[in-house]
Image (cartoon, helix red, strand yellow):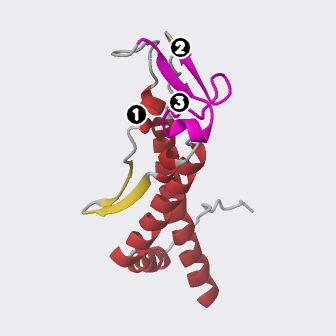
Amino acid sequence: MAATLRPWKISIPSAPTIRMLKVIRESLTPQKMAQITSRAAHETKRSLMKKTPVRFTGRTAKSWQVTKSPDGYTIENTSEVMGFLERGTKAHGPVRARFLYIPLTYRASKGWTRSLKFGKDYILAKRVRGIKAMHIFRKEKPLARDRLRRYIKNHVTRVLVKHHANR
């Protein structure tokens, strides 16, 4: 007796896949996408605030703002100091004065007064080395994109798990 060869088959019906895609499409409403995007934007702002160095007042770190724009959300820092932190500075000296005034304490950062002590509250320098660029914003950009993708992926996964549980 000769053995008959049967082809091995796997059939994948398209109807469940179409239903799943419909569920995903219905879950990604403009309101839900705006909610997810807002969450990612505010989480990015928190991350940027943590990475921004704080010296006397913390004003630069507090200057991060999230604003709604027509195409999503914009995260920006309104502090002038952020440009120096992001891009760094070269070695430089005074422009008009004979010495650079460098505050060492919070009290001295408000400006010079007679009660301040040289060497303790402030120093005077002919030149400073400058600061190395920190690239806080540039390093955060890809992390923000990944964060948004992760939030969308988690949302779709929750929707599919919920849909699968309801079947």
Q: Determine the image quadrant of residue 25.
A: bottom left
Q: Which residue is mark 1?
A: 83
Disc with the residue nearer the chain's start (1 vs 2)? 1
Q: Residues within 10 Å of mark 1 (few under 14, many from 20)?
A: some
Q: Which residue is mark 3?
A: 134
Q: Amino acid at mark 3?
A: Met
In the picture shown, does residue 114 fall above or below 140?
Answer: above
Is-magenta flag for residue 101?
Answer: yes
Report, in whole angstroms, how far the alpha carbon at label 1 lies from the one at label 3: 10 Å
Element at label 3: loop
What segment carries the magenta color?
98-124
Pick whichever, 149 or 105, lies toward us. Answer: 105
Q: Which mark is residue 109?
A: none
Return the x and y of residue 78 as percentages of the image width and height. Answer: 37, 47
Q: Determine the image quadrant of residue 95.
A: top left
In the picture shown, does residue 22 fall above or below 130?
Answer: below
Residue drawn at the location 40% of the way across and 59% of the way down: 66
Element at label 1: helix
Q: Which mark is residue 125?
A: 2
Task: For marks 1 and 3, give the one nearer the viewer.
Answer: 1
